[in-house]
Image (cartoon, rainbow, N blue to C red):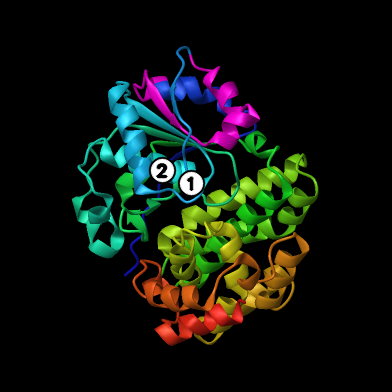
Amino acid sequence: MALITYLTRIEFDEGAIAKLPSILDGLGVGRPLLVTDRGLVASGLVERVAGLLAKAPIIFDETPANPTEAAVEAATALYKESGCDGIVGFGGGSSIDLAKAVRLLTGHEGPLAQYTAVEGGAAKIHGRICPLVAVPTTSGTGSEVGRAAVIITAEGRKLGIVSPHMLPSVALCDPELTYGLPPFLTAATGMDALSHCLETYMAPAVNPPADAIALDGLKRGIPAIRRAVADGSDRGARWEMMMCALEGAMAFQKGLGAVHALTHPLGAVRELNLHHGTLNAVLMPAVLRFNRPAIGAKWDVISEILGGEPDRVVKDLSRDIGLPAGLDAMGVTEAMMERVSGEALKDHCHGTNPRLPTREEYLELLHQSR
């Protein structure tokens, strides 16, 4: 039997950010907390968005690259002391995930670990929480339509909080907001989106709509990512990449796999603070090879879209758009690999890989990605 659930309200268009005031009004939000990061404040985008609103929003701009429970608590305190009645998550996946976790705490008591998927936390999450509008400024995580927030908990583990109640009230997707994204971040976030399309298509659950959406995202993203990296003002490429990210996340309701089971604990390594999309790009070739015996004809479908053997095409693409050659270049040590290979077994994405790795096989995947 297939259980198929879709999803949330999406506004997708160039210039769609102009709709933010009316969307907030429709949700009954008069004093929003805008969750973002300092880079977007410095870019002027936050000022631009705040200027659309009749009243200035309360701004939390301390989102870390890998969001932490401490940052969630700080933003929640600001939300409550400022009398906010809704949230706008504005930025990349980190800001939107942090906004989701703050929203959770508007109706639930901490700590966050009790709500994580690995702790069976979904049953504790209810819908008596504030409205949330998610506004992505990158084309990567697709968190604006995802039912998860991935947070480094107080214990130092990077874990997913997964529930339909975590879906934003509205996803407001405006490709114009990504025009100023520099080439490296365009590449890294774009490979994140492509990894979602690939992993969810390979996941074994029966969900033909998710498979179709994932393949459409892959068909859009593969040709567009090179163009977007080469010319950030290419409107067509930016539109296609934002749609690829959206579709990748719509599809991964079906499940992800070993790439994300590894990148989550790698992203929790505090001394490195590694970018999630970059890790996905580096690990994907080895995981594709590992999954090949279990996915049958899906390998041929992916090969046709990519124009060659998937593991080789992904590796070459990552190199061509300027991403690191491997984990060694990113500072990942053997000791870190040993630790991460064990943590991957506990990640909520482990169980939806088409071929379940052992700890030793996870370690070998890391070695192949050096």
In the picture, measured across the screen, residue 37 lies left or right of residue 207, that is right
Q: Residues within 10 Å of mark 2 (few under 14, many from 20)?
A: many
Check disc 1 and give the amino acid type: Ser
Q: Nearer the viewer, residue 316 or 217?
A: 316
Question: In the figure, 39 relative to 272: above or below?
Answer: above
Question: In the figure, 18 relative to 266: above or below?
Answer: above
Residue 15's x, y, as percent?
63, 28
Question: In the figure, 147 relative to 71: above or below?
Answer: below
Q: Residues within 10 Å of mark 1 (few under 14, many from 20)?
A: many
Residue 291 appears in the figure: no
Is 32 magenta? The answer is yes
Q: Which mark is residue 159?
A: none
Is 278 magenta? The answer is no
Q: Which residue is mark 2?
A: 98
Q: Which region is colored magenta?
A: 25-53
Residue 47's x, y, as percent?
57, 22
Q: Quadrant of residue 168?
A: top left
Residue plotted at (63% across, 26% down): 44
Quadrant where the C terminus lies? bottom right
| Mark 2 and mark 1 residues within 8 Å of each other at the beta carbon | yes
Quadrant where the N terminus lies? bottom left
In the picture, measured across the screen, residue 222 lies left or right of residue 144, that is right
Q: Which residue is mark 1?
A: 94
Residue 174 appears in the figure: yes
Mark-to-mark CA distance, 2 and 1:
6 Å
Check disc 2 and give the amino acid type: Leu
Residue 175's x, y, as percent?
64, 38
